[in-house]
Image (cartoon, grey):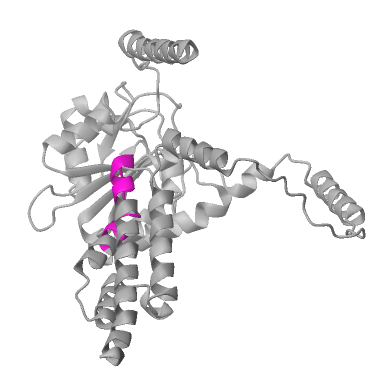
């Protein structure tokens, strides 16, 4: 008892220490550093997109995050969905074509895709970027070009641009930084639109402070209500490290591992021998007190708190009695109602108590009974067997009495 109390106190101390550690970490942990440049919807820093995520929610958009690859777009309602790729990482080598094709199928089905950064352009059909003509890191005030809705937003600021460099006549340039195309779009049949932004800055927490950037965000996402209302899915899958199964094999000494596995297999084959000696019966140690074994097993079941073995054993004993003594066919044992109907026809009396016991045994398979209830059920099975035995004796003695009369 003393050892159990000591163990319980040790566990409680450990749990208390863990709770205290979690609490202190939550209270005193430093906030996310503002130098985090990853444009994710979880980043509240200047370069993060958490502000855009929360803002669209408040404006009535159906906004969600995606922790799955672009293949999830095959199940999306393309005509009413906008997929956002904010400076994503490049997919694993064996998954690139699969993911890029999924985005193109989504566009051709009427979906809207917004991608930023040089690696985001790779997700777009025919997407390719080049080097900026100005110094990387300098602030650029984009100048609108054309008369599209995106161009009418006006001038907005960008940092670290990756200008669009694909020669596609169907792609329209909406804004430039000098000679660099920093905002382009292309329309597809069925209402699909792809939009490329050379930097994630306009939609960042810092960039949305400009009215032009906010206006550009709302135009790019599509309407929040009405017939053309769109749900917005922010990708978070490609912000993590992507690795294919083959990537984990790089650097492993595969040839050496294969040779070692073959050597182990040959060793097992050469060391395997069939037993050639005489076959002997296993030594059985007689137990001087069978009751001791029964009491030990009972103590084990009591300590474990299980009742299913007892009720299952009683169920098998009852079915065996019905088959061997009452003549129950084996193909009827799968239905309690059929068993009760057969026994009723066999003895000419209704067997409501037998049906009740069978139903209780069936229910005991799927629930944990208290030891007291399990014992009562086992006793009910024994009482039912005794009752049927008396009925068997009565039915066997009736023909003899009738002959004597």
- Decide if residue 125 is on the left or right side of residue 357: right
Total residue callouts: 0
Q: Quadrant of residue 183?
A: top left
Predominant secondary structure, magenta span: helix
Please state the extent of the stretch shown in magenta in the rendering.
Answer: 359-376
Q: Which one is in front, 310 or 177?
A: 310
Q: Quadrant of residue 331?
A: bottom left
Q: Reply yes or no: does residue 370 show up in magenta.
A: yes
- Decide if residue 237 is on the left or right side of residue 46: right
Residue 368 visible in rendering: no
Q: Residue 49, image x and y in percent?
A: 29, 31
Q: In which quarter of the image is residue 350?
A: bottom left
Q: Residue 346, image x and y in percent?
A: 29, 82
Q: Which one is in front, 235 or 367?
A: 367
Q: Which one is in front, 352 or 70?
A: 352
Q: Residue at x 26, y 89 (%)?
A: 402
Residue 2 visible in rendering: yes
Q: Reply yes or no: does residue 44 show up in magenta.
A: no
* Residue at far left of view: 226
Relative vertical location of residue 143 with respect to residue 394 in this rendering, above or below = above
Q: Quadrant of the C terminus?
A: bottom left
Q: Residue at x 65, y 41 (%)?
A: 288
Q: Residue at x 39, y 13 (%)?
A: 12
Q: Which one is in front, 88 or 195?
A: 88
Q: Residue 40, image x and y in percent?
A: 35, 32
Q: Quadrant of the N terminus?
A: top left
Q: Residue at x 31, y 21 (%)?
A: 46
């Amino acid at each position: 008892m003393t050892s159990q109390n000591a163990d319980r106190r040790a566990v409680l101390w450990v749990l208390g220490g863990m709770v205290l550690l979690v609490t202190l970490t939550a209270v005193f942990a430093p906030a996310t550093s503002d130098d985090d440049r990853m444009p994710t919807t979880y980043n509240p820093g200047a370069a993060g997109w958490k502000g855009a995520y929360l803002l669209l929610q408040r404006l009535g958009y159906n906004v969600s995050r995606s922790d799955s690859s672009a293949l999830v777009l095959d199940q999306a309602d393309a005509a009413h969905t906008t997929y956002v790729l904010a400076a994503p990482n490049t997919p694993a080598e064996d998954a690139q074509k699969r993911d890029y094709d999924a985005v193109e199928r989504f566009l051709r089905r009427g979906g809207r895709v917004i991608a930023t950064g040089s690696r985001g352009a790779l997700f777009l059909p025919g997407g390719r970027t080049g080097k900026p003509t100005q110094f990387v890191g300098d602030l650029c005030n984009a100048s609108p070009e054309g008369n599209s809705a995106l161009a009418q937003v006006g001038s907005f600021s960008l940092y670290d641009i990756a200008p669009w460099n694909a020669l596609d006549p169907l792609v329209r340039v909406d804004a430039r930084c000098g000679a660099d195309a920093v905002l382009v779009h292309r329309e597809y049949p069925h209402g699909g639109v792809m939009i490329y932004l050379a930097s994630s800055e306009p939609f960042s927490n810092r960039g949305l402070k400009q009215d032009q950037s906010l206006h550009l965000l709302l135009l790019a996402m599509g309407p929040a209500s009405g017939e053309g209302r769109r749900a917005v899915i922010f990708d978070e899958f490609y912000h993590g490290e992507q690795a294919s199964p083959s990537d984990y094999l790089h650097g492993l000494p595969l040839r050496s591992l294969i040779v070692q596995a073959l050597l182990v297999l040959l060793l097992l084959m050469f060391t395997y021998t069939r037993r050639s000696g005489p076959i002997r019966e296993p030594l059985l140690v007689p137990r001087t007190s069978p009751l001791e074994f029964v009491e030990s097993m009972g103590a084990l079941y009591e300590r474990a708190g299980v009742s299913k073995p007892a009720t299952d054993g009683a169920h098998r004993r009852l079915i065996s009695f019905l088959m061997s003594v009452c003549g129950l066919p084996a193909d009827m044992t799968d239905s309690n109602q059929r068993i009760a109907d057969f026994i009723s026809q066999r003895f000419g009396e209704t067997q409501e108590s037998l049906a009740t016991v069978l139903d209780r045994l069936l229910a005991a398979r799927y629930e944990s009974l208290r030891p007291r209830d399990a014992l009562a059920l086992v006793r009910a099975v024994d009482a039912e067997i005794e009752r049927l035995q008396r009925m068997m004796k009565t039915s066997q003695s009736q023909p003899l009495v009738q002959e004597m009369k």
